[in-house]
Image (cartoon, grey):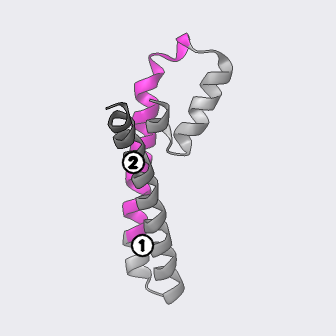
């Protein structure tokens, strides 16, 4: 049972990053092929949700920042910018 409770969160995080990387590779392919309209849409649909995730991940944790040491605050900020805030939670 412990395996299943660990499997789903880890699989969810891994698949999230695989999805983002595949979207970035697709956008690069569109750019290299000169398909600027498709590149722009793909980049938009990758960047905007990423910024929203970073903003809300940071906003949720601001209330608890006073409980952490300065090193953990910096670490959390960097991981939030790298879209890894789900990993921290």
The residue at 42%/43% (across/down) is 10
In this view, which residue lies farthest toward the front?
A: 1
In the displayed structure image, the side of residue 66 where residue 53 appears, left or right: left
Closer to us: 58 or 71? 71
Tell me if label 1 and label 2 are in contact, CB under 8 Å: no
- Is residue 33 one of those drawn in magenta? no
Picture coordinates of residue 51 (x, y %)?
44, 47
Which quadrant: the C terminus? top left
Report the magenta residues as a range: 42-67
Q: Position of residue 8 (x, y in %)?
A: 34, 42
- The alpha-carbon separation of the residues under discs 1 and 2 comes to 29 Å
Dot 2 falls on a residue whose secondary structure is: helix
SS at circle 1 = helix
Q: Main secondary structure of the magenta part?
A: helix
Q: Nearer the viewer, mark 1 or mark 2?
A: 2
Which residue appears farthest toward the right when viewing the image? 71
Residue 75: quarter of image: top right
**Which residue is label 1 attached to?**
40
In the picture shown, does residue 74 fall above or below 37? Answer: above
């Amino acid at each position: 049972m412990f395996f299943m409770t660990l499997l789903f969160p880890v699989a969810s995080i891994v698949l999230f990053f695989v999805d983002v990387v595949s979207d970035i590779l697709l956008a690069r392919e569109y750019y290299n092929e000169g398909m600027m309209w498709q590149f722009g849409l793909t980049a938009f649909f990758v960047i905007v949700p990423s910024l929203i995730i970073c903003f809300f991940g940071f906003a949720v944790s601001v209330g608890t920042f006073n409980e952490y040491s300065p090193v953990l605050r910096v670490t959390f900020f960097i991981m939030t910018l790298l879209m890894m805030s789900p990993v921290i939670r």
